[in-house]
Amino acid sequence: MSTPAIISLALVGLLWLAAVIAFGIGHKRWSWVSVAASFLVVLSLSGYLYLSARLLQFEWRWVQSIRGKQVQLHAVRDGLRPAASGRLETIADVKSITELRRERDRWARAVDRIDNWRGRH
């Protein structure tokens, strides 16, 4: 779930609990059952807020972890790193995997040509 989805879910829950509390308190006769029910609703509200905050924290840590892994992946695979503007820029002394493969193939062709010279003498 994204952060706006969690916040909207928390707000809907808060509104629902506020309506239940208002219904319990707004009743004409005050009985101990309605007071106890309102108190339990307030307790459940605090538990709900705690759980939604924990879920938000868990999701935030997960997003940070994924962003870190993506940065590492771009640095190793493509030779890119995030700039101050947020876009990816090339790292000066690091070559991407495709560039390294092209260089390896070029050197392999050069070695094959040199190996062919032995039979000509």
Image: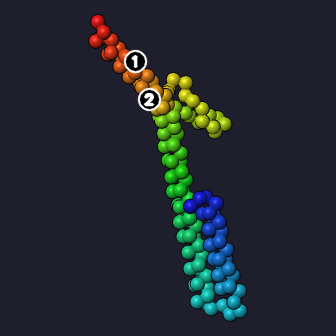
Image side of residue 92 versus residue 30, left or right: left
Q: Give the farthest residue toward the front.
A: 120
Colour mapping: rainbow
Residue at 54 percent of width and 70 percent of height: 47
**Vertical placement of 10 versus 82: above or below?**
below
Residue at 65 percent of width and 85 percent of height: 24
Residues at marks 2 and 1 touching, judged by CB atoms closer than 8 Å: no
**Vertical placement of 41 versus 2: above or below?**
below
Q: Nearer the viewer, residue 52 or 29?
A: 52
**Residue type beneath disc 1:** Ala
**Residue type beneath disc 2:** Arg
Residue 53 percent location from the top left of the image: 56, 61
Residue at 64 percent of width and 60 percent of height: 4
Check disc 1 and report its element: helix, strand or loop.
Answer: helix
Residue 109 percent location from the top left of the image: 40, 21
Image side of residue 107 versus residue 85, left or right: left
Residue 66 percent location from the top left of the image: 51, 48
Residue at 46 percent of width and 27 percent of height: 102
Question: Badge 2 is on which residue?
Answer: 101
Local crowd at mark 1 within 10 Å, few (<14), some, or many (≥20)? few
- Can residue 44 be seen from the camera position used here? yes
Residue 49 percent location from the top left of the image: 58, 67
Which quarter of the rendering shows the C terminus?
Answer: top left
Give the label on residue 110, or none.
1
Image side of residue 108 versus residue 30, left or right: left
**Vertical placement of 121 versus 36: above or below?**
above
Local crowd at mark 2 within 10 Å, few (<14), some, or many (≥20)? few
Q: Nearer the viewer, residue 46 or 31?
A: 46
Marks 2/1: CA distance? 14 Å
